[in-house]
Amino acid sequence: MSGIDAQHSDASEPLTRSRATKFLWQQLPYIVALLLAIAGVAYTNVSHQPLTGYWEFLALAIGVVCVVTKWPEIEGRESQIRLVWTQALHWIAVLVTMNIMLVSGVQQMLPTPATGLVLLTLLALGTFLAGVSLLSLQIAFLGLAMGAAVPAISWLKQSILFFLLGAVLLIGLAISFWLRQDQQPSRNSSDIDKQAEG
């Protein structure tokens, strides 16, 4: 009986890994889009230069992700064409709004790091609205995550010194604890030697 159970658990383990791999593969476009958005804002904050082409590329890439992920669920040629056109119009509107923010007169009113956050906010709003119109929970969540990244990044930038000091404190405590652990066995061995002599 135990041989059958072991054989059954061995067979279910690859099946579980296969499901987890398939799930991660399905979520990969959303994860990559989120990481690219956060990397763009981080680069803009460090370099103090807006990445106009980067944001336009990212908006187009998310538009493609929207179409590609919903395409298998749509039946009929007319519905597929409607999907492509509605998403194209949606993302063209997002791109036009982004470019309005990048017009020199508007950009002079905003510091460069703020421009990156504004573009990420517009991208997050466009992604969330695309998710709502497509009834896609993943795309809507991607938009919400991008939107939540905006205050998180600005807060992180303001409190980077606090995090740096906290990291130094934790490293100092870890080194102190590690040195104390290294000294402990030598004390124990010297105590044993004293007891043996006594």
Image: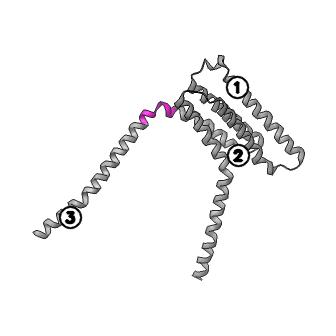
Specify whether residue 157 is painted magenta: yes
SS category of the residue bearing label 3: helix
Distance in Å between CA atoms under marks 1 and 3: 72 Å
The quadrant in which the N terminus is found is bottom right
Q: Amino acid at mark 1?
A: Asn
In primary-sequence order, the first of circles 1 and 2 is 1
Q: Quadrant of residue 196?
A: bottom left
Q: Residue at x 41, y 37 (%)?
A: 164
Cβ atoms under marks 2 and 3 closer than 8 Å: no
The answer to whether residue 77 is above or below residue 88 is: below
The part of the image, by quadrant, that contains residue 130 is: top right
Q: Is 101 above or below relative to 63?
A: above
Mark 2 is surrounded, within 10 Å at the Cα level, by few (under 14), some (14 to 19) or many (20 or more) other residues, namely: few
The correct choice, above or below, for 122 with respect to 166 in the image is above
Secondary structure under badge 1?
helix
Give the spatial CA distance, label 2 vs label 3. Answer: 61 Å
Type of the residue with mark 2: Leu
Which residue, given by chain and number where applicable, does mark 2 sit on?
137
Q: Residue 189 got which mark?
A: 3
Q: Which residues are magenta?
A: 155-162
* Residue at x-position 61% and y-position 26%: 115
Callout 2: SS: helix
Q: Main secondary structure of the magenta part?
A: helix
**Mark carried by residue 99:** 1
